[in-house]
Amino acid sequence: MVWLVLIGVIVLVYLFVQRQKDEHRRYVRGAEGEARVAAFLATLDGKVLNNVLLPLAEGLTQIDHIFITDDCVYVVETKNYNGEVEVSTEDTWRVTYVNGKVFMMYNPVKQNIGHVKAVKALLGVDVKSVVVFCGQSAKVVNHPSVSNVYTLDTFKTAMMGYVKFSAKRLDKNAVYDKLKAADLSGNPASVRVHKAYVKRLAAKRK
């Protein structure tokens, strides 16, 4: 009986450690992808904020990047996946990795709706949603009804064109300052609240 309990404890500890390792790998992968997108945005003529935490009616929402040009604010959701991404209007998208494995992910365009809503509520200006798959071998299979999903290369081309031909309608510094003042990412209590909110959302989607 004692041995059975001991084996059960060992299995639980093993599963817990594996889960922690998986979460750490996902975090590192996400951070690497966000760093690549942030580095590119920093080269453009605009203002950029990364890893922004803003209030939303339902709680708090974390935004990977907010890029401010002379005439628009872009809310950028970054995904660091390699392989083929099948874009659709459904709640889940199919990702086929280079090794043939298939992963079903929540629609990042829908995920970004809350982010856009939070920025619009704060600024009251034109806000555009963008999703970037920045894996080095990512391939996006676009859907005719979804036009705002890019690989990192196609995103770079599109953004350089947007910035080059943007009209002077916004005070970039004023918009940046307003967002910076509202950002709660430096508040540990707010970060904890957001993490709990994300876990609840994830549980609902299962």
Image (cartoon, grey):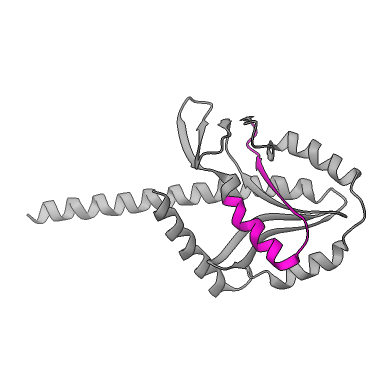
Q: Where the N terminus falls, by quadrant? A: bottom left
Q: Residue drawn at (80%, 36%), measured in percent from left and top?
A: 157
Q: Residue drawn at (45%, 29%), measured in percent from left and top?
A: 101
Q: Which sits in the foreground, 90 or 29?
A: 90
Q: Which sits in the foreground, 43 or 141?
A: 141
The image position of residue 142, as x and y in percent, is: 64, 30
Q: Residue drawn at (90%, 44%), measured in percent from left and top?
A: 164
Rendered position, 139 above or below 194: above
Q: Is residue 127 magenta?
A: yes
Q: Residue drawn at (49%, 59%), measured in percent from left and top?
A: 198
* Number of numbered callouts drawn: 0
The image position of residue 150, as x and y in percent, is: 69, 37
Q: Is residue 7 left or right of residue 33?
A: left
Segment colored magenta: 111-136
Q: Is residue 120 left or right of residue 110?
A: right
Question: Which residue appears farthest toward the front when viewing the image?
Answer: 145
The image position of residue 183, as x and y in percent, is: 68, 69
User: Quarter of the image holding residue 86?
Assistant: top right
Q: Is residue 48 magenta?
A: no
Q: Which sits in the foreground, 46 or 43?
A: 46
Q: Is residue 108 left or right of residue 74?
A: left
